[in-house]
Image (tube, rainbow, N blue to C red):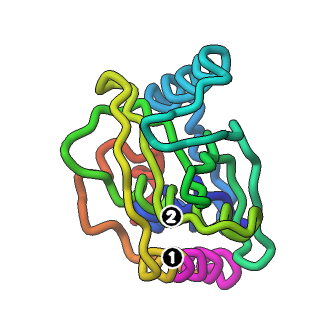
Amino acid sequence: MIRISDVLEYLYCSRFIYYMYCLDIPQHEEKRFKVIKGREVHETRKLTNRDYVRKKLNCIRKESDVFIASKQYNIKGIVDEVLFLEDGTAAPLEYKFAEYKDKIFKTYKFQLVLQALLIRENYNIEANRAYICFTRSNSLVKEMEITTSDFKKAEKIIEEIIDIVQKGLYPKTTKSSRKCVDCCYRNICV
């Protein structure tokens, strides 16, 4: 099974998957500033407003820090919050140690799409939207619609990652060389 976080790495640069799974070279993300700060935000959130339900989102109840997995899709992860809404649907809510910059990045989008996919399967409930809380923008919450084509694209991404891992395929490099500047694999990537 792959992790939802593996999908984020793959979307950033598909070679992350190759180095982590095929060559077994860890990236040591626990040493990166944003990872450390993000984990601190999650720990703080766990201790404050634990029973707070977001009524502005028409939420009637929530579950926090939910481990969720799918044998069908071969993926697992933790959802910060699963929101159960008045209209009978559910939605993931993810906290990000980030500022909102007038768009939702592809990595964030597919993290939420995969979480919604897992919620649909595990809770047998429709999940056609998701929410992101940008903690560095005064905890601004943005809603994101999830379409059938988003779910299909997410399934395709999972298949591509599993192909790399199972077949040992060496993927093409990222199209943006700016990503390479801060990459933990930059010294070995060809």
Residue 115 seen = no
Q: Is residue 150 above or below residue 20?
A: below
Give 134 or 53, whichever is nearer the viewer.
53
Q: Position of residue 34 (x, y in %)?
A: 44, 30
Image: magenta residue range: 155-168
Q: Secondary structure at mark 1?
A: helix
Q: Are the residues tagged 1 and 2 within 8 Å (C-beta)? A: yes
Q: Is residue 7 left or right of residue 57?
A: right
Q: Is residue 159 above or below residue 39?
A: below
Residue at image mark 2: 113
As shown in the figure, which amino acid type bears the numbered disc 1? Phe
Residue 137 seen = yes
Q: Residue at x 63, y 49 (%)?
A: 84
Q: Earlier in the sequence, mark 1 or mark 2?
A: 2
Give 116 or 20, whichever is nearer the viewer.
116
Q: Which mark is residue 151?
A: 1
